Image (cartoon, rainbow, N blue to C red):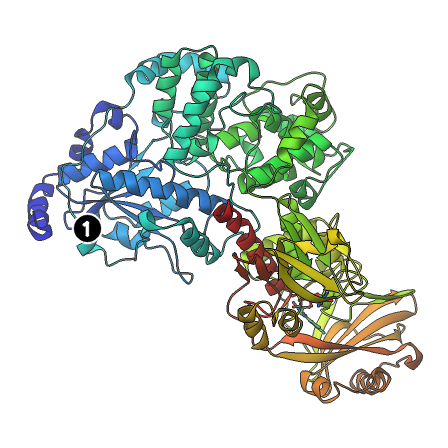
Amino acid sequence: MSIELLNNFSILLMQNIDVNALTAALPIHLAERCDVIGTEPPNPDGDWVVYWMHHAMRGHDNPALEVAITFANSLRKPLMVYQGLGGQHAYDSDRSHWFILQGAHDVARELNEAGIDYRFWLPRDHARSPLPTIVSRAAALVMEQMPVAPFPRWQAKLVSRATTTVVRVDARCIVPMTLLNQAPDRAFRYRDKTKHEYRQRIAAGWPATALEVHTDTTQVHDVFESLPIATLSDSDLHTLIASQPIDHTIGPVIDTPGGSTAGYQRWQTFLDQGLASYHKKRNDAALRWPQGVSRLSPYLHYGMVSPFRIAKQTESANLGGSGKFLEELTIWRELAHHFCAHCDDPDSLAALPSWAQKTLREHAEDHREHTYPLTALQRGSTHSELWNLAQRSLLVHGELHNNLRMTWAKAIGEWRASPSEALAALLDLNHRYALDGNDPSSYGGLLWALGLFDRPFDPPQPVLGTVRPRSVDAHAKRMDVPQYRQHIGRTQGQRRRIAVIGAGISGLTVARALHDHNHDVSVFEKSRGPGGRTATRRRDPYQFDHGAQYFTATDPRFVRQTRLWHEAKVIRPWDGAIVSLQDSRSVSEKARWHGTGGMNQICRHLAESLDIKRQCRITQIRRQDDQWIIDSEHGELPDRDRVFDTLIITAPAPQTHQLLSEVHPEFAELAASIDYDPCWAMMTVVDATDLPAWRGAFGSGQPVDWISLRSAAEDSATCVAHASPAWSQQHLESDAESVADMLADAVQMETGLPIDRAATVAHRWRYARVRNPALIEAAFDPLTRLGIAGDWLGGNARIESAWLSGAALCGHVLRAQSISS
Ligand code: FAD
């Protein structure tokens, strides 16, 4: 039937269909899991029935899909299954994108085979989601129930604008979330209440419904360009992910590929080899899969495997571990779903039972033996080896054994300065790194660590009060920690030997992230310490930030990093006014940050525990037998320090060009196209008794651009001045003493400050500021495993761009692992 005929027919038909008639057509097993949240009648002029898929990524056993098919059949409209990955989710990363896009491949195959139209949207150039437009043209909209942020908010916004019927379907739970009318508080009560409900539903399995109206919706697809997901290779995914404004410092988990095929393979192996002993072995994190736990949770989280099928097969298998596994899959997993569906704000302490809130409040001020900022937790650098290993399991492998996760979570409860900071860290670390993160089950587990689904335990302990205690040390005694260490110490894909040239912001950002992913990283830096253009020069008792003085943050990823550095006391807000000396006016109040105790603190923090070869200028690089060989100005380095399979260069563009001209003409050419402005910096000491009110000032530019003042001792302050690009260029080859004199004169004239000439020195930044940054954020050649990063790539040639460039390059290296594995 043509689209036009079909539309006329369906308009006639729909004049008689209201919401009730539409839902009345649903069989009971679907109707019981539907919530009508948009009560408008179906839109007779609508082009299609839309199913917005996100956490039921499968074409089988999918109640939301079947509701959509039933609606399309009733309304005689085409069906479009829409999925989008807009990069707006707080925890979007290469890891989650990789898993979802791989999974979408299987969805496309399955839906295509069933003749169902599946459209996938990935933004280009920061484009906005087409979903509102699609919905405005929908005859009816079907959504999934996913009762954790951001989905309820996103859905509410969409519904508020919808002019058609909107139905939300529970495709996640065997006993649907719609069946209970309040949040359950204890597992045993939930079990008692739902025993019969489970019995019937598990045995019934899942009957399939066929789509009756097969129409090609391409004619009405003028809203967005869908990704040809079924034809994309891993290398296409690599390129697509690189273009997304998401967190590139969290790499794909290669040994857990996304999709129903991989999910059911994992399930089948566990069913055959692990389920029989699940009840005995499930608590031992050191056991090698398929012994112990199923590791199915990422697939359940994204709905790539069907909980209905898994439950039925578990029951039918009737093995030793079947009962315990079913208890976890149904009672504990679904208890958490039902809880989130009926809880106003699972992200806050208010989600806890009142006794837990009270005891945590009463002990909020207790002395804590250890407190850690989020950066230390993130890297797994606490005093506890087992805890660190657990965290590294999350960071590197995107998973954490369920029983150890409970201990990991309890420790965070004790190691943060307050209960709300503990909850924030729990949610952040879990959701950011775990492939199964941001699931209702995550909330069940994380809030359990603070008292949810539990009772008070006496006597009260420091910090957690009567919340059930659980010790990491005791856990370590009951497991084989060396075996676990060996398992967690692996890399995703081949372990790489990586040389990073340059210990500035970009080099250390990429080195840090790759080291944190268990790769073997060495950093080579020509100066005496890390910092690059965020250097701090010390001359007792004074210190001078003679390069960058402060930085600003605009990209949400860097804004978050800034928050983390601030919490770890690595940076602090710029203190003191900033003025323009020309018109004596205050300059805008935007947030400016500088390193606590000097700008180079940021690089020092990034460099912690990294292998850095200082005062080691790399002068030559070459390829030999598929390896990179590097040599320094001091001659040949020992073999351990000169042969690498991956090479990363983060020097300013002219120095990068010099190193690469013989070995990688393409990257060398890109580097050669970048121009820099030089900057002469003057450092001096001034009398502090009569300082002006400002601490930073933009000068006239003739010749001074910028002056900063910092109290150093009771009677003296340090002063740094930067000359303008034009003046610096003009005096580029002048000697430092005469430049120091000229700039001191200029500062004295502009400010009236008496300058101590004997304490005045100048430093030349030959490559200070990039004039024409390249458009790409970073580049990586997967054939030779050569990467380039730095503030000259992408962005606006500042600290923020250097950080983003390092992060982008990290993404290239980690994603390439999956292609070469
Ligand atoms: P770099 O910091 O230059 O790091 C590259 C590193 O590579 C250096 O440590 C270098 O020694 C090393 N290296 C080079 N060649 C070799 C080799 N062959 N072997 C071994 N090591 C090598 N940014 C802001 O955001 N706000 C500001 O207000 C600001 N003001 C600035 C003022 C001045 C005077 C200057 C100079 C810069 C300023 N910037 C500012 C820019 C900011 O400092 C840089 O964008 C950022 O620090 C660049 O980081 P990077 O890692 O890309 O490069």
Q: Is residue 527 left or right of residue 410?
A: right
- In the rendered image, which quarter is residue 73 located in? top left
Q: Is residue 123 visible?
A: yes
Q: Position of residue 168 (x, y in %)?
A: 31, 36
Seen from the viewer's position, the closer of residues 194 and 642 is 642
With respect to residue 403, does 123 lie above or below? below
- Disc 1: CA contacts within 10 A as few (<14), some (14-19) or many (>=20): some
Direction front: furthest residue: 625
Q: Which residue is mark 1?
A: 217
Q: Position of residue 655 (x, y in %)?
A: 67, 72
Residue type at the position of mark 1? Thr
Q: Is residue 37 visible?
A: no
Q: How many marks?
A: 1
Measured from the top left, where is residue 668 in percent x and y? 58, 71
Q: Quadrant of ligand 1?
A: bottom right
As helix, strand or loop, the secondary structure at mark 1 comes to helix
Residue 539 vertical placement versus 167 (above, below): below
Does the numbered disc 1 mark a residue whose Cβ is under 8 Å from ligand 1?
no
Q: Quadrant of residue 755?
A: bottom right
Q: Is residue 111 left or right of residue 801?
A: left
Percent from the top left, x then y, of residue 487?
Answer: 62, 31
Q: Which quadrant would residue 603 be assigned to in this image?
A: bottom right
Give left or right: position of 306 versus 350.
left
Q: Is residue 218 above or below residue 290?
A: below
